[in-house]
Image (cartoon, rainbow, N blue to C red):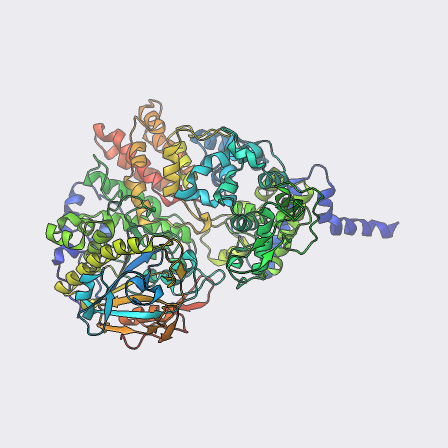
Amino acid sequence: MRYHRYLLPLVAAVAWPAALGAAEPPDPAKLAALIDGRLSSEWQKAGVKPAPVIDDAAFLRRSTLDLSGRIPTAAEVREFLADTSPDKRAKLATRLIDSGGHTRHMATFWRRTWVPQADTAEFARLADDFESWVAARVQENAPYDRIVRELLTLPESAGNRRGAVTPVGFYAASESKPENLAANATRSFLGVNLDCAQCHNHPFARWTRDQFWQTAAFFAPPTKDKSGKAVPPELMIPNTKKSLAPELLDGAEVKWPEALASDTGRKLLADWLTAKDNPYFARNAVNRLWAHIYGTALVEPLDDLSGDSGNTGYHAELLKELADAFATSGFDLKYITRALVLTKAYQLSALTREDAPADPRLFARMPIRGLTGEQLYDSLRTAAGLPPERADTGRGLGLEGRKRFAAQFRVERPVTAERSITQALSMMNGRLTTDLTDLTKNPTLGGVASAPFLDTRGKVETLFLAAIGREPTAKESKTMIDFVEGSTESERERALGDVFWALVNSTEFNTNH
Amino acid sequence: MFSLRVPRSALRAGPSRRDCLRLSALGAIGASQSGWLQALAADATATPKKHKSVILLWMNGGPATIDMWDLKPGHDNGGPFKEIDTAAPGVKFSEHMPNLAKRAKELAIVRSMATREGDHARARLVGLTGYTPQGAIQFPALGSLVAHEFDDPRADLPGFVSVGGRTGDIGGGFLGPRFAPLVVGGDRGFGAPATELKVPDLERPAGVTTEVHTKRLDLLSGLEKDFAPGKGHPVAETMKAATDRAVRLMRPEAAAAFRLEDEKAAVREAYGRGTFAQGCLLARRLVERGVSFVEVTLDGWDTHNNNFERVKTLSGTLDTAFAALLADLKDRGLLDSTLVVCQGEFGRTPKVNGQTGRDHWPTSWAAVLAGAGIKGGQVVGKTSADGTAVESEPTRTPDLIATVVKAIGLDPMKQNMSNVSRPIRLADPVAKPIKELL
């Protein structure tokens, strides 16, 4: 028996990752611990000390931006800072992930991943309907594989019904062309970049032109043979005499049913693509979510998991473990998101002065990220005490201002966000900022200016909490108070507007850190 | 040697000391430790760096150079345009470029561009960076490379300006956002009306006086000082740098560069009235003020159908503006120090398609260079009688880039450290500068 006493813990430790899936329901905290374990062993190997853990105010701001797409309100900051419960960060993560803001924010995130074309003028009209559809799925926490399956196997008539909320935008953005759909579907759902193989064998990866067109052929309707019977389609490679039937990228056999419908090919591709044992499907989703939360993906480049780094890269193994947990959970998006933000790694400072842990692949400190156009717009409104201009699931009506702003401040990826001079000028002199320095249009400012119970110190503090989610330092407080009180009586209110102007133009406001 | 012919006062790199003292007396700067305007005032005596500049006329979409610079009269592929003689003996252009024909002694036509990328996005990337995409390396645009080499942190104007819209995907790359272009002229939608060539939001909002503006900047600089000061925060750096440059650009001396209305009406007319034409005029004004790289886009060359009508119109636009630009640069003594390059991402199929159009053709096409000591009045390279193949002096994109780099006095083999910690040369090491031109 003594023998067993030593053996048991060992068995438990070895079996731990596998046991993650067996537990019901899956525990995100356990998965978070696994992530922390893997990352800290990488830090040890590299001889790197992780950045310090951030304070509550910084955690609230970061997680609210990441999970709800906006900064916290002054009231939310005060409430969170006053909360003394030890698990308040975990509770906050849960509350944010269940919020309507999360639904809308993730709808934009997935739409941008799957239909990036809708960020261009040509296809911008597709964004609203598509995001509404994703939002509805996210809100009900539909399993990720079902969402993708539904998107790919959408009935052809779905797009024709007026007012129907459908993912038809995915097809529309590809102009329903098999070759465009093949490239978009493999990139979006598998992290496999086939694009270049359309015209020639891919120069950097292993995909061939034949494989590209074999994948595209799944999106073509069946053809009729001599006897009039529907048979699997073939696609001709343009400018060649070569005609190819649908084949799966991994060479698995395609089992065509006896009777073929117009969408049989799409359904067969969707079956293979969303299967639990597809090596790319779950990894791609987790890798993109990781990049959303941590700035850099576990395996880069995001669009090509089939490259060398996909299987052997820095964190290829961790990605696989996370993907397995995700698949085993029944592709539960909220579970995996919760796990990613419950880690210690998620709480590491971005603003550490030490230069050592700068290699982004180590995740030993959080990178400073630029706000997306949508985050910036919603955060400006939040800072001004205005309600977010959006419904959680409905169609975007009257949101033209938000859309225009988001397009102007669009960033390709937050972790490599660039700010142009043009954008900086817009933040300083543009219509939106100008409106927000006006007491009559900015409830925060109006309220602060007219609050009889607040002295100048209190007014300045409230503006700091509303805009950058923290209290001013002693030095900042003094500068701002001196400035406001140094103004003449008639200029006091305008001076508060100037403080607000400076706050929203600061790098601190414009970044997630 | 390059000499600037604008008054020194218009080129000051900061507000005058008197302005500063005045603002200070108003309490606008007060006891601040780090105000922007103070920092600018310290540079008030700085002179702009003297260097050569590049104006890239980017023919977006892939111009049918077979209908412009390398006609094939008498051949089935030749199309309906006639060839005309030019001021350079033996050099012939399309009849739709009469003004450039008169200036042909300044132009060098490279008729032997032979490249590989036939996809717009990839070919544009290769054309604008000189490199074929490779994994994770973020190649900077040539404009960013040049702006980086001639960088003057005290300059009011950014080193790289892109006029007439551009796809935002090729910027500072591994050199960082500081060297990304200032984009003037808004979107470049297909068929969209000409956008005004203004820097949006350059002016302060109504009611914001100089004094208020100064106070705001002072508060802001206090907030910026302690935020993310450590190394390796590229996103924070880009935010700060953009604000810094925006503040400087707002100063009247700098903003004046964009005031095309300051030009005489006759000068504006000479260039033509469209966005591209006025963009060329703006390019001259910017180069004059020390901007090292200006890109001006003329879109619409993707002529898969109705090629000849469209190329005729586009050639007319190009002809008037390009010729006026050369004349203007010459008159102002700037042509010796300014290289003008005219090219697209590739050419178009010599064979005319069923829609009277021409399709993408990287195999044989033409690029044109002038100024900065380039030997004009000559043609480099030769294509076959049907226009489908290069028969001599094949020139690839890296060769052209290396030629540009060398012409403005830089070493194409100079290295910069890239984002993947691998040094990358200004031009691909395989490049051979076109010796006939230099």
At a point 72% along the width and 37% down the height, the residue shown is A24
Task: Inspect this view and state whether residue B161 appears.
Answer: no
Above or below for B292 versus B310: below
Query: Which of the 4 quarters of the picture holds residue A251?
Result: bottom right
The residue sitting at the right extreme is: A1
The residue sitting at the front extreme is: A227
For this rendering, which residue is in front, B403 or B31?
A: B403
The residue sitting at the top extreme is: A452
Of the 4 image quadrants, the one containing the C terminus of chain B is bottom left
User: Whole-percent x and y of residue A35?
Assistant: 62, 49
Above or below for B373 versus A155: below
A474 lies left or right of B17: right
User: Whole-percent x and y of residue B271?
Assistant: 18, 55
User: Whole-percent x and y of residue B337?
Assistant: 20, 67
Task: Inspect this view and state whether residue B44 appears.
Answer: yes
Total marks drawn? 0
Of the 4 image quadrants, the one containing the N terminus of chain B is bottom left
Above or below for B395 versus A511: below
For this rendering, which residue is in front, A214 or A424?
A: A214
At a point 44% along the width and 53% down the height, the residue shown is A353
User: Whole-percent x and y of residue B236?
Assistant: 39, 50
B149 lies left or right of A256: left
